[in-house]
Amino acid sequence: MSSAPSSPLPSASSASGVTAVSIPTSAMGLGATDAPLSGARRALVLLVMQGLPFLGLCAGAWLFVQEGIRALDVALLVGMYLLTMTGIELGFHRHFAHRTFETTRPLRALLLVLGSMAGQGSALLWSGVHRLHHAHTDMPGDPHSPTLGRRGAWQRVRGLFWAQFLWYLDAPAIPRFGRFLERHRASPASVHAQEEDSQEQRLARTIPDLLRDDALLRLNQRYGLWVLLGLALPAAVGGLATGTWGGALRGLVWGGFVRYFLVQQVTFAINSVTHMVGTRPLETRDDSRNNGVMAVLTLGAGWHNNHHAFPGSAFTGFRWWQVDPLGQVIRLLARLGWAWDVRVPSPEAIAARTRRSAAP
């Protein structure tokens, strides 16, 4: 295992272990070819991103009041939550965005599908946005900082809602990124040769390693199919287990819609809550914080101050009591020979970044 870098604020490239990429300070600002979402398009994006998942939660609440919740419902909800959260945190975050470990082609494809089933955007879009976040954390250019330029209690509350629910409304590249990649599939290298100054272009320039992987790109462009699979799978299991259409409907509601809402909001809370609530034992140039509750809910991502101090680390828990379930999964994969080049900071590097007031 190699040691992760310990620079105070890594660029998108050093955070992910890839070739250096130049990212402007105004990385997610509107370029000359951009137009901010407004009117009907703004309402449509808000409906798709927040309204439909919330309606799914309401469907679950209605079903609970009418019929209660059964063991199979709980199993599908928990099972699909764990699968899709693993796809996001182990796949999209630690593998694709940061390249903290390498893995086999089949497992790489499985992680992409599981993460896509969470419905938070394709693997390449998610990775591009996240690399921009690390390049400009809580500074101009951060796409979803809850604290940047906000002073006072009311402004902080607004910042929390901004980072949790609304930041993507000022990112027109998000609904357009799939079509942008489709235009450049024949020649991904052309993305870096053009002088276009759009959000899509700037996002694409952060992921040259991912764009070079043609098989990954093909899977990525089937994102809509994987989202539907995330809804169809629990419906099919519910129907087959009960032999009824009612069982299929309950599987769709609990393992599909309710799970979709919960995974989305818990993941988005990493953008908001863990930059505002928690402890900061390690020195960083941002507001990232460790939050034990969020660590449990995200299978390890809640040790966010640890992560921002060492974004290239495959593990987020640096103390024995910092639970990191997906870190244990990576260790298991390494023992099986299914993961290698696992990156981890040395104890000396962690000690050097530990705040004196936080040292034991």
Image (cartoon, rainbow, N blue to C red):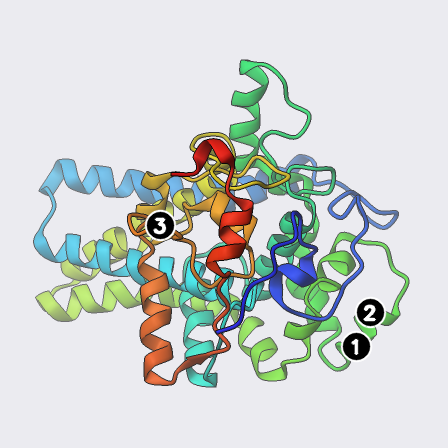
| In the displayed structure image, the side of residue 68 where residue 92 appears, left or right | right
Q: Residues within 10 Å of mark 3 (few under 14, many from 20)?
A: few
The residue under label 1 is: 189
Q: CA distance from mark 3 to mark 1?
A: 42 Å
The residue under label 2 is: 192
Q: Residue furthest right?
A: 195
Q: Mark 3 or mark 1: which comes first in sequence?
A: 1
The residue under label 3 is: 319
Q: Residues within 10 Å of mark 1 (few under 14, many from 20)?
A: some
Nearer to us in this view, 34 or 357: 357
Look at the image and tell me whether residue 153 can be seen.
Answer: yes
Task: Please tell me which residue is depicted at 60% across the width and 29% down the height of the picture.
Answer: 147
Task: Please tell me which residue is depicted at 26% across the width and 56% down the height of the picture.
Answer: 255
Question: Disc 3 or disc 1, which is closer to the eye?
Answer: 3
Q: Residues within 10 Å of mark 2 (few under 14, many from 20)?
A: some
> Could you tell me if the residues under marks 1 and 2 are in contact, i.e. CB atoms within 8 Å?
yes
Q: CA distance from mark 2 to mark 3?
A: 41 Å
Q: Mark 2 or mark 3: which comes first in sequence?
A: 2
What amino acid type should be assigned to the residue bearing mark 1? Ala
Task: Please tell me which residue is depicted at 47% across the width and 70% down the height of the picture.
Answer: 112
What amino acid type should be assigned to the residue bearing mark 2? His
**Where residue 249 appears, x then y in whole percent?**
22, 56
SS under mark 2: helix
Q: CA distance from mark 1 to mark 2?
A: 6 Å
**Where residue 307 appears, x then y in whole percent?**
50, 51
